[in-house]
């Protein structure tokens, strides 16, 4: 691992009580008692939340930066160097929070009940601590994997949306019109988004999963996917009837959005759905 670390420490804290669930120090630069600072971090978050009616996201010290991510029960805090990419750090916190809620909360209970019955033993969440270690190690060795994973997540979400739109119940002739018109709209985009050149567009959708995520910058990929969704929504609305379009939204797009709402919110794709399909 590089001696120039981006991530210096991580805490998972119970909101309200300030109990330290998991804590990890990755640098001598974090010279403090991890258990003692956890209630302080929790209290700081609560104070900002109550006093200013704002959600605390970051605090800068002279040398480092504290990054917060929270839900109703948990507070994830990361102390990072000021050179660290803030967007990547926040993505990691969001990812870790989702992982905790998915894998650490027993199926037969909820997070509030689990924390209420937890006696504060750190060993309870040993596996999650190991997961945090692996995530940090992976990032410090190369952040390409993390960004590629983020890109792949976005490709999967947009692929589902494209397929949902193309499930519109209409005539074969109209479906072919949608496909042909989309191909025509994509053609002039190739100057900006060359990676779209060999992507199949057919009656099933737009096969964006074939895009090589290692060969395209994340934001460039997102711009292209957003434009494709905008165009597909526009073209479909123009060609099919209002009833066919409305039925497609409620029968296919919205059920998928509800199933995968966390990813749509994490990557701000829900905004695109509302903007371009409604």
Image (spheres, rainbow, N blue to C red):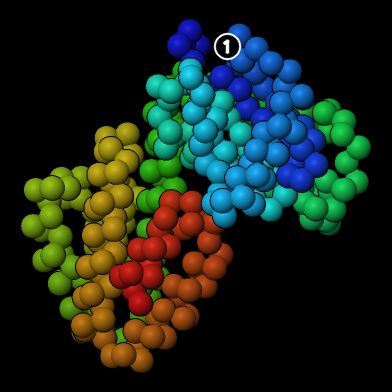
Circle 1 SS class: loop
Q: Residue at x 70, y 38 (%)?
A: 42
Please state the horizontal and vertical placement of residue 143, each as a whole percent of the image: 42, 26
Q: Which quadrant does the C terminus fall into?
A: bottom left
Where residue 45 sits, quadrant-wise, is top right
Residue closest to the eye, 166 or 255: 255
Where residue 200 sits, quadrant-wise, is bottom left
The number of discs equals 1
Residue closest to the eye, 174 or 95: 95
- 276 w.r.t. 55: above or below: below
Please state the horizontal and vertical placement of residue 154, each as a whole percent of the image: 40, 50
Please state the horizontal and vertical placement of residue 125, each as a whole percent of the image: 78, 33
Q: Residue at x 40, y 29 (%)?
A: 85
Camera sees residue 103: no
- 92 w.r.t. 28: above or below: below
Please state the horizontal and vertical placement of residue 90, each as a whole percent of the image: 49, 38
Dot 1 surroundings within 10 Å: few (below 14), some, or many (20 or more)? few
Q: Residue at x 53, y 61 (%)?
A: 261
Q: Is residue 219 left or right of residue 122?
A: left
- 2 w.r.t. 276: above or below: above
Q: Residue at x 72, y 49 (%)?
A: 73
Residue closest to the eye, 154 or 173: 154
Q: Is residue 69 left or right of residue 164?
A: right
- 172 w.r.t. 9: above or below: below
Camera sees residue 39: yes
Residue carrying label 1: 29
């Amino acid at each position: 691992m590089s001696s120039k670390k981006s991530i210096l420490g991580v805490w998972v804290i119970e909101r309200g009580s300030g109990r330290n669930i998991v804590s990890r120090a990755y640098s001598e630069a974090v010279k403090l008692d991890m258990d003692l600072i956890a209630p302080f971090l929790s209290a700081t978050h609560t104070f900002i939340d109550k006093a200013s009616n704002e959600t605390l996201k970051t605090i800068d010290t002279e040398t480092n930066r504290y990054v917060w991510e929270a839900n109703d029960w948990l507070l994830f805090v990361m102390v990072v160097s000021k050179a660290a990419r803030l967007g990547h750090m926040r993505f990691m916190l969001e990812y870790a929070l989702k992982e905790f809620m998915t894998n650490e909360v027993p199926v037969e209970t909820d997070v509030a009940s689990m924390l209420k019955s937890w006696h504060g033993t750190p060993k309870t969440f040993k596996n999650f601590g190991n997961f945090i270690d692996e995530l940090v190690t992976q990032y410090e060795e190369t952040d390409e994997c993390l960004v590629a994973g983020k890109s792949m997540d976005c490709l999967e979400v947009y692929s589902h949306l494209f397929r949902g739109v193309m499930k519109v119940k209409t005539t074969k002739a109209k479906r072919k019109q949608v496909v042909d018109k989309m191909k025509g709209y994509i053609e002039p985009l190739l100057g900006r988004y060359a990676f779209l050149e060999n992507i199949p567009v057919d009656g099933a959708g737009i096969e964006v999963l074939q895009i090589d995520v290692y060969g395209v910058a994340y934001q460039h990929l997102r711009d292209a996917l957003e434009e494709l969704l905008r165009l597909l929504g526009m073209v479909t609305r123009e060609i099919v009837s209002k009833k066919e379009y409305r039925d497609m939204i409620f029968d296919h797009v919205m059920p998928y959005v509800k199933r995968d709402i966390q990813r749509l919110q994490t990557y701000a794709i829900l905004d695109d759905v509302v903007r371009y399909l409604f």
